[in-house]
Amino acid sequence: MNAGIRIENLSKKYGNVQALKSINLDINSGELFGLIGPDGAGKTTLFRLLATLLLPDVGSAQMCDIDIVGGYKQIRNLLGYMPGKFSLYQDLSVIENLEFFATVFDTRIEDNMDMIHDIWVQIEPFKDRLAGNLSGGMKQKLALCCALIHQPKVLLLDEPTTGVDAVSRSEFWQMLKSLKSKGITIVVATPYMDEANLCERVALIKDGEILQVNTPQEIVGQFERNLYTIKSEDNYQSLLDLREFEFTNSVFLFGQSLHYTDVRKEFSLEEVNSYLKHKGRLHLEIEQIKPGIEDCFMALSTKNDGHE
Amino acid sequence: MDMNSDVKVIKVKNLCKKFGDFTANDNLSFEVSKGEIFGFLGANGAGKTTAIKILCGLSYPSSGEISVAGFDVYKQREQLKRNIGYMSQKFSLYEDLTVFENIRFYGGIYGLSKEVIHSKADDLLKKLDLQHARNKRISSLPLGWKQKLAFSVAIFHDPEIVFLDEPTGGVDPVTRRQFWDLIYEASRQGITIFVTTHYMDEAEYCDRVSIMVDGKIEALDTPAKLKEDFNAEDMDQVFLALARKAINIE
Amino acid sequence: MNRFFGFLKKEFYHIFRDKRSMLILFGMPIVQIMLFGYVINTDLKDVKMAVLDHSKDEYTAEMINKITSSGYFQLIDNLESIDEADAVFRKGDVKLILVFEPDFGKKLIKDSKGSIQILTDASDPNMANLEVSYLQGILQNYNIEINKEKQMGTAIQAKSRMYFNSNLESVFMFVPGIMATILMLVSAMMTSISIAREKELGTMEILLVSPLNPLQIILGKVTPYLALSFINALVIVGMGYFVFGVPVLGSFVLLMAESILFIFLALSIGIFISTVAKSQQVAMMLSMFVLMLPTIILSGFIFPIRNMPLPLQVISNIIPPKWFIVILKNIMLKGVGFEYVWKETLILLAMTMGFIGLSLKKFKIRLQ
């Protein structure tokens, strides 16, 4: 069965706000696909359209070759959906939540154990605890179990890792990888740029528009300029200094250093070095590095802003 | 933070906070210097929020000696509150008031005169390039602007220390950096920054970082030193190493 | 069917685990009925009255005696002239003045007709109204009494409005009112809040995305409250009967059938509210202001409808509890059968159909 998603020219408007602007996107069957963008980019709107919760203003989309508007009833049987907030019943226990969602889909937990087994073993020790008393990471795992209980073909996860600590986040991605091996198409929305590398392909999305769709490697490979990291004894001062520098294309704080691009294709690093030295910076270290997804996102989004 | 680094604006010694049998903060001790950017990290439920509430004078510790901005958290809570600023991702500005009405309201809370509020508001809006939005409702602004404005409002009364509770959650990477620009600038003016975040790269922007695990501070140093100690490439690995340890103990 | 029972199970978990809803469900009816029965008892006792007797014959003397011996009224003053009335009321002690026309007794015998004027201090209009009603009740009884002895009927000009409640016990009137209020509260408010809660927590999104259809979701939400409301109706009637001795003169089955109809109506209003409200808070506010206040104020439960200004009297017709209260009073206190309440029943039925239709139309299969 083709469990892919095809999105054509999809637009959605709320009042005066254009939440999605003519989105075109193809997600392959069995793919682990990332939708990367900040809050307000339109990720949730896109998910709700795909989950048949909203109707598009313009455009169309098919999931498993079924139209999301006309075939919403069929899609609802094939879809596992985890909304932004972990939508669990806080006053029901872990097992009661799971049982409820199983009956909603007219199935039983036992019949689907193979699907959720790996995740279930992690929360089983707490099965009689009320969902409201679980930690963020545990809630997230339970919500995932509930979304998988009817063996969906497509899984839509809206910011499953937001507000969850780093350990739970990395465990969560491990689970998604093992789910992928079962042939489910997984679409994950996340505001964390670093999670892009865990997906097979990603779409970078901002202000209702897709900036780019590709594998993380390709996106990084398409970075247009050479990227340099600059360290000094006072990074913030270097940042201010470089903003004044006539050849600066972009300069951003990045962890313990700055990421810098130059407007020129050919230039000598020594020039930048001596400029900063002249400004009084000490212990300068300048190196060329490979860009990350975040560099690409920022480059693409500032470029876009420039056009407007 | 250079020349002021010997002035300690936050002094915490043996802070303990218990809720019944549960120890939320287990014997915390640390100091924060004037103008320092202090990262306060920890997994969900590690006890960060509990500690921040105590430092802001919103709840009493079970035991320990704590002074913030030179004021004792037991006896001088009112003075303490007057000398700190607070901003969180959840609560920042009133959505149904305009930009200026919000500024005026917060200025008024801290007893600033009308003239001071007006002149400072003009400066602030100019700096943020928001003059055109002066009379717009907060709800009509993009998230990034709101966050920047919320921060500026939190330091509007020139507090000694500003507490930032996950200030950049969900904000796009460019805006996040603009936000950190503001933080650095405030720090240069001598305002101490006490910040929590889930973004590990932001931990690297801090002068020093503490990592809390299960109510205890398990690590406290500069990011560079922590990475060295844990033989890690970035703060993410440091954090994971510490947090995983906690889970294994459980 | 499995799906439906799964849903029901979940709903009962919600209800039984939430102390607040348990309190509203089972504490409320008992507290309310006790409150109205005992505390806010507007029964009259020793209302201070004065008499201006222009006739001073045996009839007036006997009537005054009847009135004062009823325990409701206490005679503290005899006036000589109508001019004193104003001053007596201003002093504040006297709440009511009874004026007999000159030659009252003679006219009663000769013309079979005697006139009495009742003056009340209407600064508390409800009490004044109640006093007049009680007084008229007593006069009516007296009228019946004297007519027994005579061949030809006489008439004291006073109409009894308390005909169906001859003991004049106010708690009788409160039971139907409380019944309407509680059933409205439990059914409409609780369902609307419970649906709004799912929206607020985001679980509604998952339910909508699941293969459940709107009718299944609505039925699953409504059934537990239908059952609980029915139990409530039984509790209220039972408490009225056993604690306050309020009779059910008419058919008990009819009474319960009408109650179920009203519960259906309230539930459909609750669902309708939930289609409008996005959060529990909004649902609560809407239920409060759109349902509770009109139920209490405009349904005739506390304030008699006939005393309202005309616009409010007209509005009261669209308040569902008004019709339910009429039905309850008829069945419980008058003891009449379906042939006397079919009109009101039809109105409730039409309202129910209207709201169910509206809700089904508004209850979306999508979020927007």
Image (cartoon, rainbow, N blue to C red):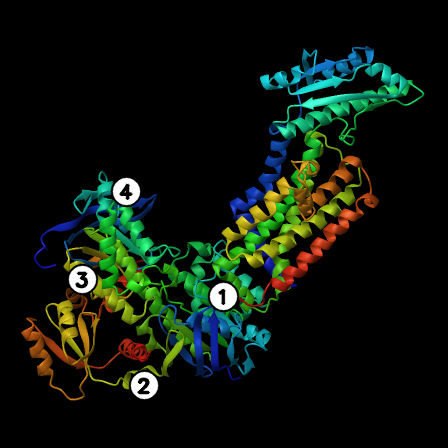
- Residue B34 position in % (x across, y down): 14, 54
Residue A37 x, y percent position in the rendering: 36, 73
Q: Depth check: C23 or A244 in front?
A: A244
The residue where tag 4 is placed is B60
Instruction: Please tell me whether residue C145 is drawn above or below residue C238 in the rendered image.
Output: above
Q: Give the label, 4 or 1, closer to the camera.
A: 4
Q: Please state, as top left, top right, bottom left or bottom right, where the N terminus of chain B lies in the image.
A: bottom left
In which quadrant of the rendered view does residue B233 lie?
bottom left
Q: Which residue is mark 2?
A: A218
Circle 3: residue type: Glu
User: How many discs mark residues in the rendered view?
Assistant: 4
Disc 3 target residue: B185
Q: From what the image shows, is residue B64 above or below residue C100?
A: below
Residue C21 visible in the snapshot: yes
Per the image, label 3 sits on a secondary structure element best described as helix
- Residue at image x 63%, y 53%? C269
Instruction: Name the secondary structure under disc 4.
Output: loop
Identity of the residue furthest to the right in this view: C151
